[in-house]
Amino acid sequence: MSRIWLNGFALLSVLLFANAPEYEANQPKQNASEAVTGTLQKLIVENASVTIQLDLNGLNGSSSLVARPVTLHFAAAPNSFFPVLVFNDLLRGLQPGSITLALQNSSSAGVIPLRQGDGGQDAPGYSNLPSALRSSLKRLTVEKLPSRQGVDLAVRDSNTGFTFFNIEGHQYNYDAAAQSFTITGGRLVISKQFASTLGIPSETGSLAGTISIGAAMRPIQIDQLVRGETKSMVMPAMQHTVGPDTPNLVPGPDVIVGNIENVAQSSAPVGTQVGLAIGTDSCNNGDQPVDWFALPQTDHPVVPQNLYRMSGGANNDARFEQIGQSWMKHTFLALEESVCGTCNTSGCQTGSHLCPGCSDPYTSGLNGDQGSIGSRAWVNPFTGNFPLGNTANDHSGHTHNGVSHRILVETSDLIPGQNVGASYFGEAAYISPHEYTWCQSHPTQCNMFNNYSYRQFSVAGGPSFFSFPAVGSTVRMQAAIEAWAVTGATINPIQPDPGNDGIWLMGYKITSPSAGVWHYEYALFNQNLDRGIQSFSVALNAGVNISNIGFHAPPQHPGWANDGTFNNQGYSSTPWSVTQTSDSITWNAETFAQNQNANAIRWGTLYNFRFDADQPPQTASATVGFFKTGSPMMVAIQGPAGGSPTPTPTATATATAAATATPTATSTPMPTATPRPTPSPRSGPLPRPRPTPLPRP
């Protein structure tokens, strides 16, 4: 039997991890005299039992948290990805992963055990547990964390990432003959996050119980090494069933967000804002590998993250607003996992490419790692291009606080008591330059418009620390604004310059809050349009009276040294100006000529425009003006009824700029488009770029 004690354990520099495929790109080769020969296995948990004994009595002199000790029994979800590395039958270490726990019959003195089918929250015998823990009993995980986090193992909520306990003093044991793995002697200590939720922050680190795990393991990768070189690799078939939402591989490289894992708060608020991050699993939905070369190379995807809120009206769905946006994670080292189905590494260089059908995880901790996320200002979202070297991720010259570069959200937009009935949606995307270059050489294999996915969450806690329980599953290959369409909103994709720039989505919904009053809500989402949007004008017909005029935009990040904005000043958060005339109402930001850092609708952001009117809706037109280049264009919407439904556009044309506001210029010249009416809502497919992308899901 092989054993590893956590305390004082360190891997030797000659450890052979460098020879595993996922480390090849980043580790030097060993000298032949030092290199090892043998069998390296990566194993995961096939099945396991987990026992947690809790006794929270006496904390802070109180016996109110738990009336008596409680023993909780769990089974592990089959094939939990909790990687263990074994060399020549000796345990050599663990990699980050998690064991998903399924609550079984448990007991506490004097109470009834959990019945089959009972949920953790309402199960007899658990009413004395703290409510936060009680509500999470059916979605707990044991996670192996990256070494730099200072904690080796933790017990968390799998949906929200909320940490209840850190695990200390445990011992790892591996029995090669039985192919079994155990964790014994683990002490559960209360995390800072849980202690704050309980209102006893001084008890952070207090002993709360013990944990033990016994697991049967199964190999997923077996490498034969000779003098440090991999001579053969076997990847035993995974025993799992691919779900019905498994993507069908399409021609070309096609990176998508296969799973939105969670939304997590990273630290205490700074002022009135919190910093959040979203965990993501990318999937290659294509039949060609996706380039995944780490910085300072530029041929890898970047990962922006957004948070939205749907609220207002009788059904809390009258408006859909973006309330936060992050910088973007620079990806590195694809791990070739199987979140989206069968992972095919045959003929694919692993690590530096995401192979067909394979997935790659980024926890919320990684996507929120401030030293590894770069400003969006450096990236052309249509081409995916950004400057060579570490320029796009240069953090020299500035110091981070707890919310820097993460999803900036005002606490007032999250506090449940101030947002009763609101729904929340986490969104992420993978923007890949490889998809663009492949599209240029393979005109019928363009996969650049399905990179966004979203998932619904709720919000609990506050006013300082929040948790985000998941409400539904990830909706793949759709931007979050499509969640508004489910409630009856109209969402139309618009492409001003096919082949040279990306798309934006025109959303609108009209409700009637009271007799004789109609609320007009417009949402403009810039998905990957490099030129940006600077003005929005709605035609008003004769006799229409409007009131309650409004505008909403997410917070912009402040200026940081080397952030890619003009003079490192950051983008403006100045609300758009509004002008009302007899035949139109127009909102606009400053033009590019006036301010290169103006508060334009840049890629990956959504802005709202609204008013009430005393006339019902009819088919009408709006005029949209662009920020960097291009003439205004007209789009189909619904507006207040009256006279002519197609008035003369009133928005001011924006100046055509010779240079962009960001250091990345548009890849090809952009011809000026002639303003033209768009088709009626949902009347036809999106005008396709040269070359033709796949249809939107």
Image: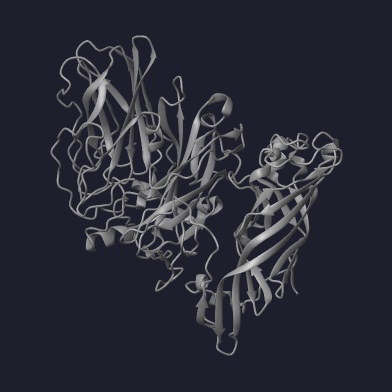
Q: Is residue 347 above or below residue 593?
A: below
**Residue drawn at (18%, 49%), measured in percent from left and top?**
670
Q: Is residue 446 above or below residue 42?
A: above
Q: Is residue 484 above or below residue 39?
A: above
- Whether residue 92 sits left or right of residue 667 in the image: it is right
Q: Nearer the viewer, residue 568 or 556?
A: 556
Query: Quadrant of the rendered structure where residue 37 is?
Result: bottom right
Query: Quadrant of the rendered structure where residue 246 is?
Result: bottom left
Q: Residue furthest left?
A: 674
> What is the number of callouts on the image?
0
The image position of residue 445, as x and y in percent, is 26, 58
The image position of residue 627, as x and y in percent, is 25, 39
Q: Is residue 668 above or below residue 173?
A: above
On the rendered image, what quadrant is the C terminus found in? top left
- Whether residue 496 sits left or right of residue 280 in the image: it is left
**Residue drawn at (39%, 43%), measured in percent from left and top?**
570
The image position of residue 108, as x and y in percent, is 83, 42
